[in-house]
Image: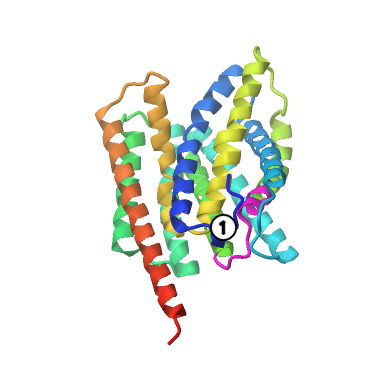
């Protein structure tokens, strides 16, 4: 996970962090499915333990690595940032789990991850002045088309209006989290690892009462297996992935972040075919290729833009 202050992180490395985070997120679904089979843990309780254990790991890593900061951040601003990003993360995760329960995994995934890039692109244009441009718009469109083909290609989907609303709420939480991370990361006074720790602390507190009502301690025939699955979920798709996500999202344009994170369903599809024995279909392959092509195109465009901005800043800094 990244413990480098946002402005010190090159855009190219930020793109790599986001790609790794998206791929890691894609493993969470399979691990969560196995955890549900291993015991009677509910989705909110699993989300709480994921965040709480992830918080412990992130805090320990921050202490061990002695994260560098770019400068002092006012306490009031840090508290506001922690509350806002933590609330966004809590809404994103909890509403998504509820949407999956109401309308199924396929529709919930398409609506949440499909609405996210659109909301983020609009928000980035209105709040951050980030223009998407023709290349970016084409990449977003291609990625969304690939998402629909990949997830709904099998044709087995049931649409529930309440589930769709919950998925849209999840997308709104994800969009707010992404936009706020980019907003506070632009001035170079926000430490990426501090952002992650603060967000997970707030999220854990917000989820605790709902998880307690659902049941914090599950019953399982094989407690060791369940504990191992929770440990994996807390480590790879949580502490590692979100540490990389918050670091990358602070230096990469918001719309680009949203498209790169669509690698999550691609990673899940690859995992299902290679490890779970699911059949590779034409629609799965087509959707995967569309999404990978869109992500690659937008990432290259972002990297070229970053190099161009760096050259322009260097030229402006030369003595006249």
- Above or below residue 264? Residue 248 is below
Residue 161 visible somewhere in the drawing = no
Q: Is residue 309 above or below residue 222?
A: below
Locate the N terminus and report the quarter of the image it occupies: top right
**x and y percentages locating residue 124 in the rendered image:** 46, 63
Outermost residue on the bottom side: it is 320
Q: Is residue 26 left or right of residue 93?
A: left
Q: Is residue 49 visible?
A: yes
Give the answer, above or below, for where 111 lies relative to 249. Answer: above
Q: Is residue 258 left or right of residue 63?
A: left
Q: Give the x, y percent position of residue 301.
A: 33, 58
Residue sitting at 46 percent across and 68 percent down?
126
Q: Residue at x 50, y 31 (%)?
A: 29
> What colour scheme governs how the chains and residues are painted in the rendered image of this protein?
rainbow
Place of residue 60 in the rendered image (x, y in percent of width and height, measured from the top left): 71, 41
**Magenta residues, as a range?**
186-198
Farthest-out residue, top: 221
**Residue at (32% x, 21% y) in the render:** 279
- Which residue is farthest front? 319
Residue 191 in magenta stretch:
yes
Q: Position of residue 19 (x, y in %)?
A: 44, 44
Whether residue 286 sits left or right of residue 34 in the image: it is left
34 relative to 12 in the view: left or right: right
Residue 28 vs residue 10, the one in the foreground: 10
Q: Residues within 10 Å of mark 1 (few under 14, many from 20)?
A: many
Q: Mark 1 — residue?
A: 181
SS type, badge 1: helix
Q: Is residue 228 above or below residue 81?
A: above
């Amino acid at each position: 996970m990244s413990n480098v202050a946002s402005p010190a992180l090159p855009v190219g490395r930020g793109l790599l962090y986001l790609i790794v985070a998206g791929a890691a997120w894609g493993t969470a679904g399979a691990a969560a499915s196995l955890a549900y089979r291993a015991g009677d843990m509910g989705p909110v309780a699993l989300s709480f333990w994921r965040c709480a254990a992830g918080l412990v790991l992130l805090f320990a890593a921050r202490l061990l690595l002695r994260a560098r900061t770019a400068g002092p951040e006012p306490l009031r601003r840090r508290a506001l940032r922690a509350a806002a990003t933590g609330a966004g993360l809590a809404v994103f995760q909890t509403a998504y789990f509820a949407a999956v329960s109401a309308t199924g995994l396929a529709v919930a995934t398409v609506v949440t991850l499909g609405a996210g890039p659109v909301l983020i692109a609009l928000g980035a244009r209105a709040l951050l002045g980030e223009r998407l441009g023709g290349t970016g718009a084409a990449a977003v469109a291609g990625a969304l088309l690939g998402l629909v083909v990949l997830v709904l290609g099998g044709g087995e989907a049931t649409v529930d209006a309440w589930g769709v609303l919950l998925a849209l709420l999840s997308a709104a939480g994800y969009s707010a989290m992404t936009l706020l991370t980019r907003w506070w990361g632009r001035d170079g006074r926000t430490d990426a690892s501090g952002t992650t720790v603060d967000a997970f602390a707030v999220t854990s507190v917000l989820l605790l009462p709902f998880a307690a009502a659902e049941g914090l301690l599950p019953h399982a025939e094989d407690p060791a297996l369940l504990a191992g699955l929770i440990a994996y979920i807390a480590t790879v798709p949580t502490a590692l992935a979100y540490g990389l996500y918050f670091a990358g999202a602070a230096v990469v344009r918001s719309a680009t972040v949203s498209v790169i994170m669509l690698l999550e369903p691609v990673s899940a599809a690859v995992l299902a075919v290679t490890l779970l024995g699911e059949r590779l279909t034409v629609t799965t392959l087509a959707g995967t290729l569309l999404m990978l092509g869109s992500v690659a195109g937008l990432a290259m465009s972002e990297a070229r833009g970053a190099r161009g901005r760096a050259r322009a800043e260097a030229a402006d800094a030369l003595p006249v």
